[in-house]
Image: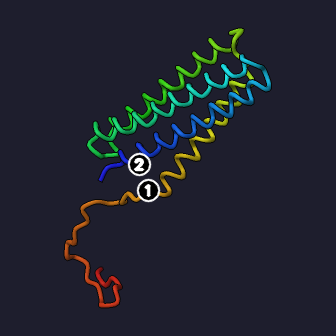
């Protein structure tokens, strides 16, 4: 069993969230700061989508590279590397965008905050509703002695 369908669902719901965020953010941005507010909301939405995609892609790649071993160094290395890339890209974008005359920083900031909270909600909802077994290929070894009522009597 693979977690890839779960991440595809996260990307789908994340895409829906991005569309809603882009529309609502653009309307609010237009009311607050005109066309600069719209552009700022759209920039924040695009940033959120890119970061969501990097996260999902890194987990899928890490799972394939580690061949499902979530405790492997390769798995953690890929996940942490992707996190580091996102952090550095975020810092660079914020530093570059904060002084641009075509960006309304408050609209951009609020859009990013709503996007982060929204993607966390998406992750929780999708994971909570997913059916992924905790263990795979469970085989009876015959070492445990159980009674007819299911109680374990082995020592």
Q: CA distance from mark 2 to mark 1?
A: 7 Å
Q: Residues within 10 Å of mark 1 (few under 14, many from 20)?
A: few
- Above or below, 88 against 147 in this view is above
Residue beneath the point at 48% across and 26% down: 84
Q: Are marks 2 and 1 in contact (CB under 8 Å)?
A: yes
Q: Secondary structure at mark 2?
A: helix
Picture residue at 48% right of the left edge, 58% below the top:
129
Q: Which residue is mark 1?
A: 130
Q: Residues within 10 Å of mark 2 (few under 14, many from 20)?
A: some
Q: Which mark is residue 94?
A: none
Closer-to-camera residue (103/79)? 103
Quadrant containing the C terminus in the rendered view? bottom left
Q: Quadrant of residue 77?
A: top left
Nearest to N terminus: mark 2 or mark 1: 2
* Location of residue 85 in the rendering, given as x and y in whole percent from the top left corner: 47, 24
Q: Position of residue 138 (x, y in %)?
A: 26, 65
Q: Residue furthest right?
A: 32
Quick one: quadrant of the N terminus? bottom left
Query: Could you say which is closer to the camera, residue 92 or residue 131?
Result: 131
Instruction: Answer left or right for 63 relative to 23.
Output: left
Q: Nearer the viewer, residue 112 or 134?
A: 112
Please identify the residue farthest to the bottom as the structure is shown: 148
Q: Residue 6, which numbered label?
A: 2
Vertical side of 56 occupied by 109: above or below: above
Image coordinates of residue 144 in percent, x first then y, are: 25, 78
């Amino acid at each position: 069993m693979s977690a890839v369908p779960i991440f595809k669902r996260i990307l789908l719901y994340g895409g829906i969230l991005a569309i809603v965020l882009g529309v609502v953010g653009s309307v609010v941005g237009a009311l607050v700061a005109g066309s600069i507010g719209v552009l700022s909301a759209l920039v924040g939405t695009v940033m959120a989508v890119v970061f969501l995609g990097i996260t999902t892609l890194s987990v899928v790649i890490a799972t394939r590279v580690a061949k499902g071993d979530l405790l492997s160094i390769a798995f953690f290395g890929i996940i942490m590397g992707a996190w580091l890339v996102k952090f550095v890209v975020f810092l660079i974008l914020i530093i570059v965008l904060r002084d641009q005359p075509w960006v309304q920083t408050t609209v951009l900031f609020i859009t990013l905050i709503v996007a982060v909270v929204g993607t966390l909600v998406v992750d929780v909802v999708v994971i909570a509703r997913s059916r992924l077994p905790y263990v795979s290929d469970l085989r009876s070894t015959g070492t445990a002695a159980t009674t007819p009522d299911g109680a374990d009597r082995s020592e």
